[in-house]
């Protein structure tokens, strides 16, 4: 097969295929821009007083800014991953027909993967162009670091990274698919998913515990960046554990629904959860990753707030005021603003994730519209079908959200849970006879130990927000179901 | 003369359902063999096994003295774009490609240059009388045009064997006969052997020989469809 044949077959498609290609390209574009921005921030060296934003000035904060930018690109990439399944039935038919005409299995996989790779390469090149144009157009060197550019090899690497990743994911998904000349067969695993991803969460938690637990006597003699990498790795492992764990959660939820559920809706939902337990992992991945990150940020905010209260109390009893005594390097509001920035990123990610969930829901309804239409024809009320969709989304989502919130909070709590204030604050006048001349400076009506609270309210809000986003997506999906269960669907090809 | 294509003791099951239960069949070069029998007797399954689309569970499929059951999936795919042509009732055209692109597809997959493949495809569409549909997509063509286009695609590589599974089953009687007449005429001109699956005696009449199946075996009475 020549390259031009490959290109022709890869871009052949109907309107859904077009939509998939465009969405893939757009998400590659956004992800590339986010990563280029992250690389730019990391390219700033040393103390950079020339910038207006404190987040860019301090070398210690810039990795955090870069990590936040990369965090934003994750749900966008997840969205691209989901798009791969858009319009799958039509593509399956096309690939089978090409196989019948004599394409080998390898060529079929190549054709399917080439589309993803080409679309995301176009997207990431467009992203690079947009980045360079915006950089030249803005010109203002105080608010944004338009005066630095990542090294050329890094730029090339980033532009190539997204298409390569997308193609790899595409090829990986095709591994479970056998394209025969008579149709596409999906290999189904006989055994349900197991709770092994829990180990990933445990590993993530362990990474967080390591550098800080004094009694383990582990000292990381490396610079801050290494510690940051360890912590970042911990967060990523935990996210991966939560996302992959949804497979097992879905399967278990499906079994419970089938056993204890009453009525046809729970039965239908339970059956779908058991048949395709990984659906949740795919569709909720970005949402759960965002919630995990948000939970980490909220827990860290609680930790910081307690830390600042500790400083205040300490300074108060020591009689310091007006910025004397111990305290953080910068104004507390600076740190809280940084966390607010992360929460904005989390919110954005959750919005993108909800959009992804919507696409996935609509896709699954459209793909099964004949089955739905024939159920309606057989007398199953539409309400039952809507309820089934709701059940099959929420039953795994709620426990998964709780897991994400708990895991994120636990990560931070492993670093520190209390601040010890000591017992008494006394001032002694005489060095020789301390007992006689000491007077109590402050009565400790305060707790001698400050506990870092679990931010129940904030975590609850975050969870509720994520749930609401999912509900909105389900609502829109149910609207599509309405038009898909028209009995007309049974008559058209 | 040894057969061009032969199946010996072919067995094929779908799970617990036996579809073929020991079938022997030989096809000589240029011969047109009709495979007939009632619905569900295993005609399509036999055709798929002979064409190397399905693997057999028992017995051997021999093509030019080679056991193609031992070949890899990729090697058998290549056979389909060089030596074998396949024609179904419907659904074998790629809906997103135009007629001429569909016909050129096996040539393109085999590495023929774009221009040459296109020209050959246009010639074949002309031979089957559907040159005017060259730039249409299958969805906008009539059933008869689609089957003529599919025939052009099955024959464009000048295969030695054409496998046709009820190629006119979805057409009205008159169009069906026209299309079938064309298939048979062109096959004879090319010296292409044809394995023609059908449950219509009028279709079987075009063949040199008829093999009747019943419940996954060759019907020993050999009567086949009443003529
Ligand atoms: N994909 C499949 N999975 C399970 N069973 C199958 C499959 N394809 C065919 N069968 C079974 O194998 C047997 C033979 O089927 P086959 O399609 O070969 O029959 P046929 O003679 O072509 O019938 P028709 O004239 O209706 O096309 C039938 O009993 C059928 O139910
Ligand atoms: Mg059949």
Image: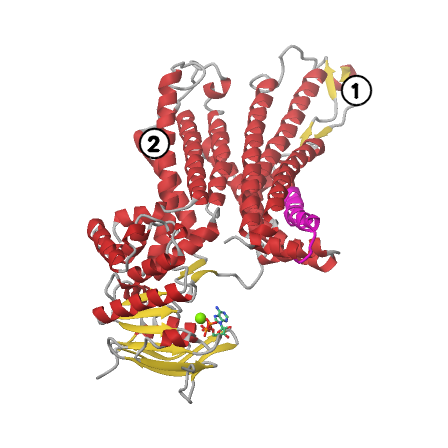
Give the Cα distance between marks 2 and 1.
Answer: 60 Å
A215 vs B110, nearest the viewer: B110
Residue A370, image x, y percentages: 57, 54
* Magenta span of residues: A378-403
Q: Residue furthest front?
A: B174
Left or right of A471, for residue A444: right
User: In this orientation, does residue B158 appear?
Assistant: yes
Q: Characterize the local packing of mark 1: few (<14), some (14-19) or many (20 or more) Cα atoms within 10 angstroms.
A: few
Q: Residue tagged by mark 1?
A: A443
Residue A140 sits in quarter = top left
Q: Check the residue under mark 1 and report the chain it is in.
A: A
What residue is disc 2 on? Answer: A155
The stretch drawn in magenta includes residue B153: no
Q: Secondary structure at mark 1?
A: loop
Residue B18 in picture, x, y percent from top left: 49, 78
Is any part of residue A238 visible from this angle? no
Q: Main secondary structure of the magenta part?
A: helix
Residue at image point 35% right, 36% down: A122
Return the chain for callout 2.
A
Q: Residues within 10 Å of mark 2 (few under 14, many from 20)?
A: some
Relative side of A281 to A158, left or right: right
In the rendered structure, which disc, 2 or 1, sits on the residue that comes first in sequence? 2
Q: Do dots 2 and 1 share one subunit?
A: yes
Q: Residue furthest top?
A: A322
Marks 2, 1: nearer the viewer: 2
Element under disc 2: helix
- What number is the disc on residue B145? none
Residue A135 drawn above or below residue A196: above
Whether A431 is drawn above or below A71: the answer is above
């Amino acid at each position: 097969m020549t390259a031009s044949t490959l290109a022709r077959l890869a871009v052949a498609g109907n309107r859904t295929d077009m939509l998939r290609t465009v969405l893939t390209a757009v998400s590659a574009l956004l992800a590339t821009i986010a990563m280029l921005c992250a690389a730019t921030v990391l390219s700033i060296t040393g103390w950079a007083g020339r910038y207006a934003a404190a987040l860019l000035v301090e070398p210690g904060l810039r990795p955090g800014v870069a990590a936040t930018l990369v965090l934003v690109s994750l749900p966008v990439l997840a969205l691209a991953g989901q798009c791969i399944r858009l319009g799958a039935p039509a593509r399956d038919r096309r690939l089978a027909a090409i196989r019948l005409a004599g394409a080998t299995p390898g060529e079929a996989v190549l054709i399917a993967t080439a589309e993803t790779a080409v679309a995301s390469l176009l997207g990431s090149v467009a992203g690079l162009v947009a980045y360079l144009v915006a950089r030249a157009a803005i010109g203002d060197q105080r608010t944004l670091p338009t005066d630095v550019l990542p090294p050329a090899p890094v730029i090339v690497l980033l532009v190539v990274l997204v298409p390569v990743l997308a193609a790899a994911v595409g090829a990986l998904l095709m591994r479970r698919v056998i394209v025969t000349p008579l149709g596409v067969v999906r290999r189904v695993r006989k055994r349900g998913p197991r709770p092994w991803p829990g180990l990933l969460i445990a590993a993530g938690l362990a990474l967080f515990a390591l550098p800080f637990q004094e009694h383990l006597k582990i000292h990381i003699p490396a610079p801050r960046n290494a510690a940051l990498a360890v912590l970042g790795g911990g967060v990523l492992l935990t996210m991966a554990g939560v996302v992959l764990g949804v497979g097992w959660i879905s399967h278990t939820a499906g079994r419970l629904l089938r056993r204890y559920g009453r009525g046809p809706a729970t039965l239908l939902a339970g059956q779908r959860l058991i048949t395709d337990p990984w659906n949740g992992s795919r569709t909720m991945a970005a949402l759960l990753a965002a919630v995990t990150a948000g939970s980490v940020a909220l827990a860290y905010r609680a930790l910081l707030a307690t830390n600042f209260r500790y400083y205040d109390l300490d300074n108060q009893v020591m009689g310091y005021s007006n910025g004397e005594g111990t305290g953080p390097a910068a104004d507390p509001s600076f740190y809280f603003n940084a966390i607010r920035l992360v929460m904005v990123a989390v919110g954005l990610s959750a919005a993108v994730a909800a959009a992804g969930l919507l696409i996935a829901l609509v896709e699954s309804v459209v793909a099964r519209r004949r089955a739905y239409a024939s159920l309606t024809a057989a007398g199953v009320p539409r309400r039952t079908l809507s309820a089934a969709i709701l059940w099959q989304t929420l039953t795994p989502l709620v426990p998964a959200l709780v897991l994400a919130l708990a895991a994120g909070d636990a990560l931070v709590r492993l670093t520190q849970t209390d601040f010890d204030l000591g017992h008494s604050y006394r001032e002694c006048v005489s060095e020789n006879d301390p007992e006689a001349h000491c007077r109590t400076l402050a009565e400790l009506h305060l707790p001698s130990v400050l506990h870092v609270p679990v931010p129940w309210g904030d975590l609850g809000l975050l969870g509720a927000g994520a749930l609401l986003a999912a509900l909105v997506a389900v609502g829109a999906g149910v609207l599509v179901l309405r038009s898909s269960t028209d009995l007309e669907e049974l008559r058209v090809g | 003369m040894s057969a061009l294509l032969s199946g010996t003791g072919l067995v094929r099951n779908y799970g617990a359902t036996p579809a073929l239960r020991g079938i022997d069949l030989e096809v000589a070069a240029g011969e047109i063999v009709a495979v007939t029998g009632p619905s569900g007797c295993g005609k399509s399954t036999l055709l798929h096994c002979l064409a190397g689309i399905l693997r057999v569970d028992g017995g051997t499929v021999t093509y030019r003295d080679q056991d193609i059951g031992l070949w890899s999936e990729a090697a058998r795919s290549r056979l389909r774009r060089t030596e074998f042509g396949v024609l179904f009732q419907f659904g074998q055209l790629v809906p997103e490609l135009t007629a001429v692109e569909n016909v050129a597809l096996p040539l393109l997959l085999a590495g023929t240059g774009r221009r040459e493949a296109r020209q050959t495809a246009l010639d074949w569409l002309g031979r089957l009388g559907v040159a005017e549909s060259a730039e249409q997509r299958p969805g906008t063509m009539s059933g008869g045009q689609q089957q003529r286009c599919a025939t052009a695609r099955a024959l464009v590589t000048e295969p030695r064997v054409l496998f046709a599974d009820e190629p006119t089953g979805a057409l009205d009687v008159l169009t069906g006969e026209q299309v079938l007449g064309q298939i048979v005429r062109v096959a004879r001109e090319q010296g292409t052997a044809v394995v023609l699956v059908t449950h219509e005696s009028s279709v079987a009449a075009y063949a040199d020989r008829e093999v009747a199946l019943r419940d996954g075996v060759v019907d020993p009475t050999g009567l086949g469809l009443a003529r």
